[in-house]
Image: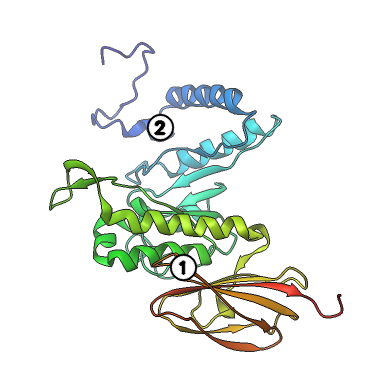
Amino acid sequence: MNNNINGIDGDPNKTGRGMDFDSLRVPAVTALQEAYIRKIVDTVNDLDNVLYEVANECHSVPPGSLEWEKHLVNYVHEYEAKKPKQHPMGMTFLLGGKNDDLFNSPADWISPGPGGVQDHPGAYGGLDADPPDAKGRKVVLNDTDHSFYYTGLQKAGFDGQRAWVWKNFTRGNSTLFMDPYLEYDSKRNKPKDGKLDPYWETMRISMGYTRGYADRMNLAAMTPQGGLASSNYCLANTAAKGAEFLVYVPKGPEVTVDLSVVSGTLAVEWFNPSTGAVTKAEAVTGGAKLPMTAPFDGDAVLYMTQTTVPGED
């Protein structure tokens, strides 16, 4: 190439695809990448709001990008260990790869691909319809671009978009939405008239609603505990004091919540995710499994917070 001022052959196989740049095949290229990483870390290490990602949607074609990504994750960890601040390092869906590779990697956060295609049976799958809970193995950023794709979201419709957001939230996953933003033609492959596409407004609004509850709750103390709700979607903090429950009910209006793990009185509110309306309900007492019924039809969100603890004034 005429602009190859470093004199390094980054395509020793002469494929013309540049796939050796995201592998460990060319040590001279890796050395330049490490120098670039050091410059980035030195420049932004004083900042708190930094997430590192090696690359998006690399490949698994031999020699593949997996070992290269793992090497750079470890490189950042080792280099930042000597710095005042350390930041989370991430890896995302590898084209043709397995989600298990991400979970078994040294990355702090990951963005997996769809289940049932790339993964062998029993792997982390179902992110497009029934996302499993994060289990604390990694911080999981469930990205529509990786796990759902637009065709799936279109088939799901407005209700499916809303459910996808709440299912992920109550199972401990974070959501990323690669927003098409503009209206597209009938095949959805190019912008039509430059207008904001209202089809995705449900997704945008739902992510805002979950953010609102995340700010209200003691989120750091809550974990996905689907077994506490008959709907199987539940974030809970079952501490003796300050207990909280957030339950998503995809098919309402009824759900049973196991409050035998807490005591005292809990305030109750129902949130209608299709309208944004909040309805306060009569307080309940912990210590048993309780059937609860939303005051509206369709999917529902139930939020309960402990207000009194036995033995305290």
Do callouts 2 and 1 mark residues in contact (Cβ within 8 Å)? no
Residue 303 position by quadrant: bottom right
Q: Is residue 113 visible?
A: no
Residue 275 position by quadrant: bottom left
Image quarter in which the N terminus is found: top left
Pick whichever, 255 or 132, lies toward us.
255
- The answer to whether residue 3 is above or below residue 154 is above
Q: Position of residue 60 (x, y in %)?
A: 35, 46
- The answer to whether residue 55 is above or below residue 31 is below
Q: As shown in the figure, which amino acid type bears the numbered disc 1? A: Ala
Please tell me how crowded label 2 is: few (under 14), some (14-19), or many (20+) other residues with Cα within 10 Å: some
- Circle 2 — which element? loop
User: Label for residue 277?
Assistant: 1
Name which residue lies at 47% across and 81% down.
295
Tag 1 or tag 2, which sits nearer the N-term? Answer: 2
Q: Is residue 257 visible?
A: yes
Q: As shown in the figure, which amino acid type bears the numbered disc 2? A: Arg
Q: Position of residue 232 (x, y in %)?
A: 50, 77
Name which residue lies at 41% across and 70% down.
130
User: Label for residue 25?
Assistant: 2
Q: Is residue 312 left or right of residue 169?
A: right
